[in-house]
Image: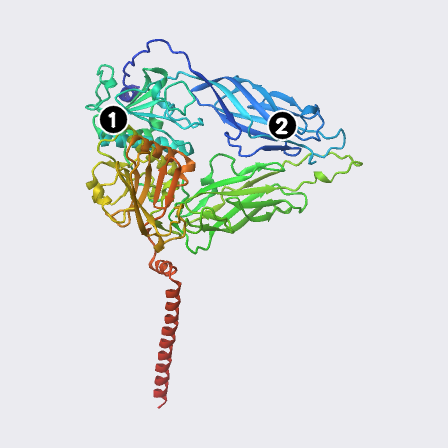
């Protein structure tokens, strides 16, 4: 008994010690001067903004559709409405035909189709019960249509209602005051249920050190990896908390944006100077407090004894959030057990082995459909931009699928498309409900065709977002009924799925790419994203960066992490070019190039406060400098002219070049001079339309848009076996290849002739 009591006492004391270490008493935050009223604001989103790219057509045999919307967990809906825009078929029977509207499987309203509405666009305002609105919601529309009072055919073409994608869901949202608990992190800084671009203020003391910038870059990349397609913005402030004047103009809320503060014991912002409320720390510490200026906004304190502690705390936030609880956490250790490998970014498909469809899923039941007219099954595939696919034999695609077998062998089929281009059609036979089909998908590199070309052969595109689409189409017998028979039947509950054990195989391909290629940087973050944690990247920053420069830096790093899906845990920064010369890394340069690089005669472009210089290629047509793919080793890409101007208007640029320090390394420079220039650079990085226009070796950013060109000698990054390298190099010289082939034939014939002569002489000698 005493032994059991001793063990229990020891366990209790151990748990108490751990609790005291990780949940130390939080300093009291300053109270608000007066009680703040909960902010409230109206939000309206169309069906198109909610993911519906086209109008929805409800039919007699496909009479239901649903739209999904979310609500952040730190908000509550006080009012909800649906503005429904629809056009009913002119052949419907009025009043008898109607639509049912459900919110989260609860009937909200029945909308009758009146006589004056037939064939005309109609708008209806429908009240939704806000008490039913949760973090994830579904609005379901069900169409009940009739075109005659007897002997109806559910598949009749007269039964339809077109629901416009301009229909809207409107909410009156109200902020909730949440407690300071890191168990909810990354909320409220990022909520996956939000639609807007997260805006997170990053706060420093005046003149932040390189170590503080590094910690902020790691945390910004973490938020960028979470935000994904949304993007993220990081306004930077020195020595002050944000106010309403600092609020981002794109925000639709009245609360202040959340903030993250980076502070060491001897370098703190002024509002942390009160040591009674914010004492010095003896280890990396993360603490969540209320914003003194807004009780509905939060401030995250990332504190440490020195810059190294800040980096440890930032990595802990990116990796160990599941361990956090209470308002204050002390980080004991963050240890990397296994280093990252090249091309292992979570958002990229693996290229070292066959990949199962189960590894490509974004949500459960993505590969399952039901109904006579089921929705398409779509799988997204992202490939590394440097995959070498020259003269490839195609990528093996092994598709296993199951379906409800039809009663007879009819025209039921499975259609397969790649990037909206048809590949093949497979019959759905009666005598089986499971099949295996093996195909080979063509694949094209960035140099294979211009972006504007229409490819005759459906192909995967390297470095692009690819989608494979499976459409199950089941034949229906409803349309063959006769009025004198008046037989009524119900459609079969038809189901189909693509087995998640289906595979696509990209193994066996090498990595080799012609550089500079800013399209690879813009679309995939290459070459920095080769290592998902940016362990082979060095970011060169100005010695005394401004707030706008730091915002550009953090948003650029977050952009790369949004493309890889992994935070830049091994991010390295330096304001000394000597570090760049010594390290075998790819360089991301912010601000300006050093003097020794700007003195190079083959520098494509450089910007200065007083003078700008641009090199033009000889193949750049007048008024057009967009790069054209397929110009590897084209002499016309070499610089033929240089233009120098001076002007007083915003201009920025993105430049790619080979690193002069290591032949297999690259430099991507984000060039700008003044604050308006950096603002244009930030807007380009956050605008999908503008970033898609970035390509070639130079992308100039002006108020008129983005203008790209390919100028200068190209170089290659990666590895090919010698025999493949030989054929690839000779492919650019067909005359030389033909000459070598003729010489090879002649040499072979000569050696064969000599061998036959030797054999003949030996035979004659033996006979003698």
How many numbered marks appear?
Answer: 2
* Residue sticking out furthest to the bottom: 768
> Which residue is the site of mark 1?
284
- The image position of residue 349, as x and y in percent, is 42, 43
* Residue sticking out furthest to the top: 34
Looking at the image, tell me whether mark 1 or mark 2 is earlier in sequence order: 2
Q: Is residue 34 above or below residue 189?
A: above
Q: Is residue 591 above or below residue 296?
A: below
Q: Are there few (<14), some (14-19), or many (20+) residues within 10 Å of tag 2?
A: few
Out of 455 and 562, give the one closest to the viewer: 455
Q: Quadrant of residue 691?
A: top left
- The image position of residue 360, as x and y in percent, is 46, 40
Residue found at x 27% / y 30%: 215
Left or right placement of residue 566 versus residue 414 in this view: left
Left or right placement of residue 547 versus residue 724 in this view: left
How far apart marks 1 and 2 lie (CA) works out to 61 Å
> Which residue is the site of mark 2?
121
Residue 346 seen anywhere in this rendered image of the structure: no
Residue found at x 22% / y 27%: 207
Q: Quadrant of residue 611?
A: top left
- The image position of residue 694, as x and y in percent, is 38, 41
Residue 101 seen anywhere in this rendered image of the structure: yes
Residue found at x 63% / y 47%: 429
Q: Mark 1 and mark 2 in contact? Answer it, CB < 8 Å.
A: no
Q: Quadrant of residue 768?
A: bottom left
What is the quadrant of the N terminus in the image?
A: top left
Which numbered marker is on residue 471?
none
Could you say whether the residue bearing mark 2 is in a helix, strand or loop?
A: loop
Could you say whether the residue bearing mark 1 is in a helix, strand or loop?
A: loop
């Amino acid at each position: 008994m005493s032994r059991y009591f001793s063990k229990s006492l020891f366990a209790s004391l151990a748990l108490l010690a751990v609790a005291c270490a990780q949940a130390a008493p939080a300093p009291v935050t300053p109270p608000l001067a007066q009680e703040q009223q909960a902010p409230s604001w109206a939000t309206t989103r169309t069906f198109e903004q909610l993911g519906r790219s086209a109008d929805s057509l409800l039919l007699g045999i496909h009479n239901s559709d649903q739209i999904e919307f979310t609500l952040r967990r730190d908000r509550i809906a006080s009012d909800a409405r649906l503005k429904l825009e629809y056009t009913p078929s002119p052949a419907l029977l009025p009043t008898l035909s109607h639509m049912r509207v459900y919110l989260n499987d609860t009937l909200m309203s029945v909308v009758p189709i009146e006589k004056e509405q037939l064939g005309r666009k109609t708008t209806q305002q429908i009240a939704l019960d806000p008490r039913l609105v949760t973090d994830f919601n579904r609005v379901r529309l069900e169409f009940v249509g009739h075109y005659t009072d007897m002997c109806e055919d559910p598949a009749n073409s007269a039964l339809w209602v077109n629901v416009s994608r301009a229909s809207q869901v409107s909410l009156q949202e109200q902020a909730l005051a949440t407690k300071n608990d890191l168990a909810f992190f990354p909320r409220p800084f990022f909520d996956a249920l939000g639609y807007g671009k997260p805006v997170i203020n990053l706060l420093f003391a005046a003149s932040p050190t390189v170590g503080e910038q590094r910690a902020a870059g790691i945390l910004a990349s973490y938020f960028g990896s979470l935000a994904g397609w949304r993007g993220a913005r990081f306004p930077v402030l020195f020595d002050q908390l944000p106010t309403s004047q600092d609020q981002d103009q794109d925000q639709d809320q009245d609360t202040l944006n959340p903030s993250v503060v980076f502070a060491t014991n001897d370098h703190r912002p002024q509002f942390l100077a009160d040591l009674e409320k914010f004492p010095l720390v003896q280890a990396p510490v993360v603490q969540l407090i209320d914003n003194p200026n807004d009780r509905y906004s939060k401030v995250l304190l990332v504190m440490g004894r020195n810059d190294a502690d800040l980096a440890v705390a930032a990595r802990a936030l990116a990796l160990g959030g599941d361990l956090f609880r209470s308002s204050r956490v002390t980080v004991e250790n963050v240890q990397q057990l296994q280093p990252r490998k090249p091309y292992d970014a979570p958002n990229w498909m693996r290229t070292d082995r066959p990949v199962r469809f189960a590894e490509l899923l974004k949500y459960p039941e993505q590969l399952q459909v039901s109904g006579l007219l089921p929705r398409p099954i779509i799988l997204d595939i992202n490939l590394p931009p440097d995959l070498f696919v020259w003269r490839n034999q195609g990528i093996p695609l092994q598709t296993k699928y199951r379906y409800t077998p039809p009663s007879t062998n009819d025209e039921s089929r499975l259609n397969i498309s790649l990037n909206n281009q048809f590949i093949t059609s497979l019959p759905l036979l009666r005598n089986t409900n499971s099949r295996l089909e093996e195909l080979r998908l063509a694949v094209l590199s960035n140099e294979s065709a211009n972006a504007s070309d229409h490819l005759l052969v459906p192909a995967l595109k390297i470095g692009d977002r690819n989608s494979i689409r499976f459409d199950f189409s089941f034949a229906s017998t409803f349309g063959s009924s006769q009025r004198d028979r008046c037989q009524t039947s119900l459609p079969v509950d038809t189901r189909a799925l693509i087995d998640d054990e289906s595979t696509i195989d990209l193994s066996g391909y090498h990595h080799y790419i012609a550089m500079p290629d800013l399209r690879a940087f813009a679309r995939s973050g290459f070459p920095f994203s080769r290592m998902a944690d940016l362990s082979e990247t060095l970011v060169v920053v100005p010695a005394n960066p401004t707030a706008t420069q730091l915002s550009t830096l953090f948003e650029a790093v977050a952009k790369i992490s949004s493309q890889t899906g992994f935070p830049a845990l091994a991010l390295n920064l330096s304001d000394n070019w000597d570090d760049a010369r010594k390290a075998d890394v790819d360089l991301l340069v912010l601000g300006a190039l050093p003097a020794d690089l700007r003195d190079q005669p083959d520098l494509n472009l450089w910007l200065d406060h007083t003078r700008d210089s641009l090199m033009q290629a000889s193949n750049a047509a007048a008024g057009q400098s967009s790069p054209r793919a397929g110009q590897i080793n084209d002499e016309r890409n070499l610089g033929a002219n240089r233009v120098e101007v001076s002007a007083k208007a915003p201009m920025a640029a993105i430049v790619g070049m080979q690193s002069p320090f290591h032949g297999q390394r690259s430099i991507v420079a984000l060039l700008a001079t003044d604050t308006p220039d950096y603002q244009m650079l930030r807007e380009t990085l956050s605008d999908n339309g503008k970033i898609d226009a970035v390509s070639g070796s130079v992308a100039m950013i002006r108020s008129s848009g983005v203008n790209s060109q390919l100028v200068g000698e190209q170089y290659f990054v990666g590895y090919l076996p010698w025999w493949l390298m030989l054929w690839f190099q000779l492919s650019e010289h067909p005359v030389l290849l033909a000459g070598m082939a003729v010489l090879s034939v002649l040499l072979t014939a000569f050696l064969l002739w000599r061998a036959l002569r030797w054999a003949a002489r030996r035979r004659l000698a033996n006979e003698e």
